[in-house]
Amino acid sequence: MKQGYARLILLLVLVAAVAMMLGCGGKKVRPLEEDEAAMEQARRRAAEEEEARRAREAEEAIKPIEEPDEERIEFGKIYFDYDKYNLSGKSISTLSANAEILMENPRMEIVIQGHCDERGTDEYNLALGEKRAQAARDFLVNFGIAGSRISVISYGEERPLAPGHDEGAWKKNRRAEFVTK
């Protein structure tokens, strides 16, 4: 019986050896030299790519800074009489020129800032500055500029253009200014 077990064990070992040989038979093993050559080629390619990237970055860093294509657009200011927000003939002329600029630049958005002189209460001047900015906005909208491109804000007497406490300074401070967003 011992011989039967021995034959059985020998048979199982042979079957296992054949199975292992068949399982590994399809794989090809590359020699170590091929692996090293492929690694060296990959290292060289990575170094060349890094050198090319650095050269591009250096070239971009020394390029002169280009000026924007669009020149800075200056809008005209409009001025108001004391305690008024109606538009004068000169104001209408200035607003028409500003409207032309906006028509030539259809993506441009602006803020109209309403200002007052120092006379009157803060609350009164804020309300008057709002009416002045709104009057200018209404003109531009009637001219054909989309209202969604124009917002208004009042600074009242908080941002005087001219210092002073006389009619000359007050006249310059009663205004509406146009600023791009």
Image (cartoon, rainbow, N blue to C red):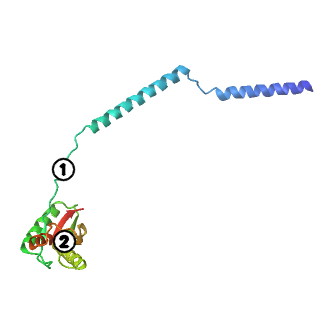
Query: What numbered label is drawn on residue 115?
Result: 2
Q: Which residue is mark 1?
A: 69
Q: Secondary structure at mark 2?
A: strand
Looking at the image, how many numbered discs can be counted on the residues?
2
Residue 31's place in the image compared with 67, above or below, is: above
The percent position of residue 29, horizontal first and vertical second, equals: 58, 24
- Quarter where residue 26 is shown: top right
Q: Residue at x 18, y 68 (%)?
A: 160
Q: Residue 165: x, y in percent? A: 13, 72
Q: Position of residue 8 (x, y in %)?
A: 84, 27
Q: Is residue 141 above or below residue 27?
A: below
* Residue found farthest to the right: 1
| Residue type, label 1 | Asp
Q: CA distance from mark 1 to mark 2?
A: 32 Å
* 148 vs 125: above or below: above
Identify the residue shown where x is 9% and y is 71%: 168
Dot 1 or dot 2, earlier in sequence: 1
Q: Nearer the viewer, residue 2 or 98?
A: 98
